[in-house]
Amino acid sequence: MPCGDEHVSHIPNRTNDERRRLLRGSIKLLVSIGFLFLLVPFFRSIPWPEAAKPENAVHVRDRDMTPGVPQAVTLSDGSRVFVTRLDGAVRKRLQALPPDGFWYPSAPGLLDRNYVVVSARTLMDEDVEALPAFNTWPGGFIAPGGNTWDVAGRALKPHPGHPGTSAMKTANLMPCPWQRHDDGILLMPMPAATTGPNPPTESSE
């Protein structure tokens, strides 16, 4: 009795197909990740352009500054500034000083930042010098006439342990522009002052 070929219908195995697709996707992902890792040394070797340095800026590195100790810097225009690097302990000490100990309590250097930069010359055209900490004096600046400031440039009233001799009311030291750098700070000269016909005067008590 003749017998014909049997027609066998193919039933796809969906589980195996899903596994194959998952395996192929995993292999492609691993190949892509490996390719990216191979490109890392290539991108590191490219001399990428550095950020433009501001004109006339003076670079001072973190490692050259001791927190809380003002450092005198002469700028490109011949003016002098003091830059002080703050850390947690110095910032806490400055914030703890009572407001009534200053002629003007506001801190021009913004104590929440990592640096304070102030002019080394007063509004009265006096040069100031850094005065290191001793006894109850926490350190700051002093003018020839005996006026004193803390490292944030705030003018201090005479008090016990005050190193100066003058009780004259005096203004805060002027804050100076600066810009954060990767390993320190960039100091810039003060912009040219422009005043109108009636320049501002200090208020009096």
Image (tube, rainbow, N blue to C red):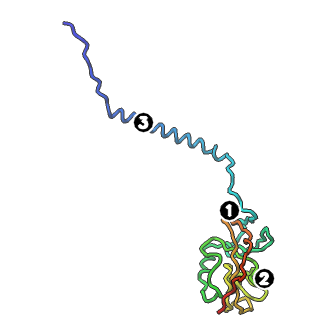
In front: label 3 or label 2: 2
Residue denoted by label 1: 183
- Mark 2 and mark 1 in contact? Answer it, CB < 8 Å: no
Q: Is residue 22 above or below residue 92?
A: above
The one nearer the camera, 190 or 165, is 190
Side of 148 where 100 appears, left or right: left
Does residue 133 show up? Answer: no
Q: Residues within 10 Å of mark 1 (few under 14, many from 20)?
A: few
The one nearer the camera, 144 or 41, is 144
Does residue 32 show up? Answer: yes
Residue displayed at 74% across by 84% down: 142
User: Image quadrant of residue 71?
Assistant: bottom right
- Between the C-alphas of marks 2 and 1, the distance is 33 Å
Residue displayed at 74% across by 92% down: 166
Dot 2: what SS? loop
- Between the C-alphas of marks 3 and 2, the distance is 78 Å
- Between the C-alphas of marks 3 and 1, the distance is 47 Å
Three-letter code for the amino acid on which mark 2 is drawn = Asp
Residue denoted by label 3: 23
Query: Residue 58 at what x, y percent from top left?
Result: 75, 66
Query: Residue 96 at what x, y percent from top left?
Result: 59, 83
